[in-house]
């Protein structure tokens, strides 16, 4: 009986130690803060436009996902799923305030749907796709053939311009350890400690959301050209076109509002 009580007491002590160490430690606290940031971001009325755009892009993806799987022939369907997964994960990182990390995943999303287009479009005899799948057989050939420059050269001009610009921003803002990315969101605290992640800077959050939406639009636009039947049947082409037009109007109105704010500030400064 006493041995049983001692064993039970020991288990309770170990459980309490586990909670104290793991559940209230720095890592879990960081996770909780991230989750709180995500919930706050999506609940804040000031972010309603950005949240609507990313949510609608996700809904379009879900509406065509199953149809694309049925339509595939010598397919790049896994790229479609992986590109969306990277994009969705980058949205979560953005909402939690981890901006450079979000750009790392955005870059991966861009590479996945960029590769998908070229691999399918240039594989009349499945040359590209087969060599990509069997790249271990000739690593040097794979490296020469499947560079990002060669991939983007195989894209339609309208997509290539937008994708190159987005890819460059991803590199500058987080996908490579550049000064802007490394120093982003750093807060120097008393004692010299540095917190180098999780920002709530409004301008940074806004401009990152723009790139997220641009990436989502380009991702779906790329696959709408690879799978036109499914996109047309599911009304996704019209929804994507409507969303793109709304987004352009949103950006134009934002720029106009920013210009008015700056002009008003300059006028008030000169009068005083």
Image: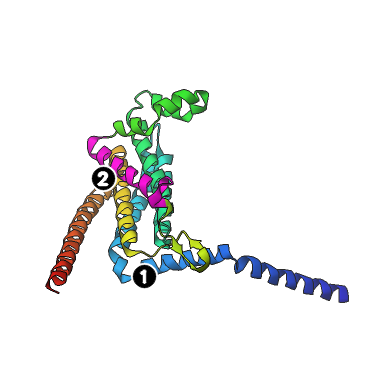
Which residue is under mark 2?
Answer: 232
Q: Residues within 10 Å of mark 2 (few under 14, many from 20)?
A: some
Q: Quadrant of residue 113?
A: top left
99 and 5: which is toward the camera? 99
Q: Position of residue 59 (x, y in %)?
A: 34, 55
Q: Report the quarter where the N terminus lies.
A: bottom right
Of callouts 2 and 1, the N-terminal one: 1
- The answer to whether any part of residue 130 appears in the image is no
**Which residue occupies the foreground of this view, 265 or 53?**
265
Give the SS element for disc 2. Answer: helix
Q: State the separation of the CA atoms marked 2 and 1.
A: 33 Å
Please give the name of the residue rendered at 35% of the width and 38% of the height, measured from the top-left corner. 114
Q: Where is residue 41 shown, x and y percent of the image?
A: 37, 66
Find out whether residue 179 is within the magenta segment. Answer: yes
Q: In which quarter of the image is the C terminus?
A: bottom left
- Name the magenta segment's main secondary structure: helix
Question: Which residue position holds label 1?
Answer: 43
> Which region shows up in magenta?
156-181
Does the magenta portion include 176? Answer: yes
């Amino acid at each position: 009986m006493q041995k049983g009580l001692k064993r039970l007491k020991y288990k309770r002590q170990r459980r309490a130690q586990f909670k104290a160490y793991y559940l209230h430690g720095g890592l879990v606290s960081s996770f909780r803060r991230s989750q709180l940031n995500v919930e706050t971001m999506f609940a804040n009325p000031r972010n309603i436009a950005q949240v609507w755009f990313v949510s609608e892009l996700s809904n379009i993806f879900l509406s065509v996902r199953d149809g694309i799987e049925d339509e595939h022939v010598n397919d790049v369907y896994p790229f479609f799923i992986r590109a969306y997964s990277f994009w969705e994960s980058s949205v979560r990182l953005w909402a939690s305030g981890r901006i450079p990390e979000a750009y790392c995943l955005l870059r991966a999303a861009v590479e996945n749907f960029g590769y998908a287009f070229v691999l399918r479009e240039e594989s009349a005899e499945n040359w590209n796709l087969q060599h990509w799948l069997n790249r271990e057989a000739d690593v040097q050939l794979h490296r020469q053939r499947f560079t990002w420059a060669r991939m983007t050269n195989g894209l339609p001009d309208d997509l290539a311009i937008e994708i190159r610009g987005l890819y460059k921003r991803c590199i500058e803002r987080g996908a490579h350890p550049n000064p802007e990315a490394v120093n982003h969101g750093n807060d120097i605290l008393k004692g010299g400690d540095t917190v180098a992640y999780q920002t709530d800077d409004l301008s940074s959050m806004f401009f990152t959301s723009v790139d997220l939406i641009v990436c989502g639009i380009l991702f779906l636009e790329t696959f709408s050209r690879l799978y036109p039947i499914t996109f047309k049947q599911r009304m996704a082409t019209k929804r994507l076109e409507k969303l793109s037009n709304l987004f352009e109007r949103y950006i134009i109105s934002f720029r106009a509002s920013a210009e008015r704010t700056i002009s008003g500030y300059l006028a008030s400064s000169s009068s005083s």
